[in-house]
Image: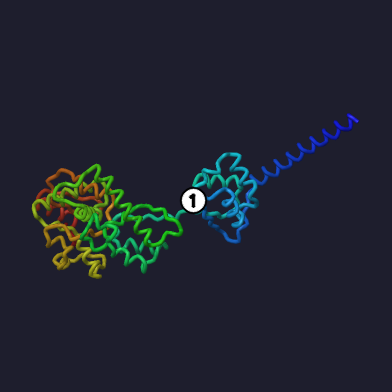
Amino acid sequence: MRRTILYVIGAAVLALVAGIAVAAGWFYTQLETPYYNSPTEETFVEVALGSNTETIADLLVEAGIIRSRIPFIAYLRFTNNAQRIKAGEYRFTGPASPKQITQRLIAGDVYYRVITVPEGLTAQETIELLARKKFGTLAEMEPIIQNTDWIRDMDPNAKNLEGYLFPETYHFSRKADSRLILKTMVEQFRTRLQTILAEHPIPAGWNIPRVVTLGSMIEKEVQKAEERPIVSSVFHNRLERRIPLACDATIIYALKLAGNYDGNIRKADLSMESPYNSYIHRDLPPGPIANPGADSLRAVLNPAETEYLYYVSRNDGTHVFSRNYREHQQAVDKYQRFRSRRK
């Protein structure tokens, strides 16, 4: 009798151990086996802020990302990572194991669309780029860039968002609309400008609109970062002496506004009547002519100390700088003899 009882107990223990082993094997297999049963090549799952583990598991099962919710939930609880899942939209494009998926959710591998907006684009060129890349539409964005409510505290007299759409690489969710995208760019301008102003405060007689306007001119005129403070010094020196800035980029902007720019500046254009014509007006234009980057804004506030009043392109991205008109003419004759454009 006793032997029979021991035999039964032993058999039960073996059965239990075997059952545990089978369950463990099933759990391990389920946890490590890649799975993808979505009807589409890519699937997006939105994990809302504050979602519990069960809700997330149900979303993944319904989307065909995991086969069963139990291994997913058990793994998160066993590793004590349930509270570390990051909210956001996740993109799935092929088989992955529940373990790999949990690691992505914990790491916050949220899906974003990425776009780089280069320095020196006008506001119109910026929204045209965004529209080409499917970040909003022109029909939505064109009226938005005419609304200056977002920059009223920085530039009370601004007529549009020209100069205030900061050039940067941005990460946007699929649901970001035109308004959110453009507002993000304005807020990025504000953030970056505050950082620059902490290093180089605005001098007496200047304000944010003047800084942005001159920064936009430097951005359009200069390719080499090391030359920006030098070109800035030329503009500062000319402003102090009440000499017209004679900046070709302002002529180009005026021609673009008039719808007459074909890629060339002609001699007659230098005398065109426009508030942006810096060949005939002695101060800065009435507003920015493009969206400047951080280096150009910093150059406005921290110009090099020079006596230069002129510069001319070498046609290789660099410039020759001169202290007087005679030196400047020699440089023009050397580098621009066969060209009509002159600084």
Quarter that holds the N terminus? top right
Instruction: Pick whichever, 223 or 302, lies toward us.
Output: 302
Which residue sits furthest bottom? 259
Give the residue drawn at x 24%, y 45%.
197
Q: Quadrant of residue 5?
A: top right
Q: Is residue 338 visible?
A: no
In-image side of 314 versus 104 (left or right): left
Q: Residue at x 56, y 46 (%)?
A: 102
**Camera-nearest residue between 226 and 3:** 3
Nearer to the camera, 230 or 184: 184
The quarter of the rendered structure image containing the C terminus is: bottom left
| Residue 127: quarter of image | bottom left
Q: Nearer the viewer, residue 299 or 76?
A: 76
Residue 109 on image: x %, y %: 50, 48
Give left or right: position of 57 versus 89.
Answer: right
Q: Quadrant of residue 13?
A: top right
Looking at the picture, how far across and down is residue 156, in whole percent? 21, 58
Q: How far across and down, in percent of the image, does residue 67 sit? A: 65, 52
Residue identified by numbered label 1: 49
Task: Give the residue drawn at x 23%, y 58%.
Answer: 288
Residue 218: horizontal and vertical position, in percent?
22, 53
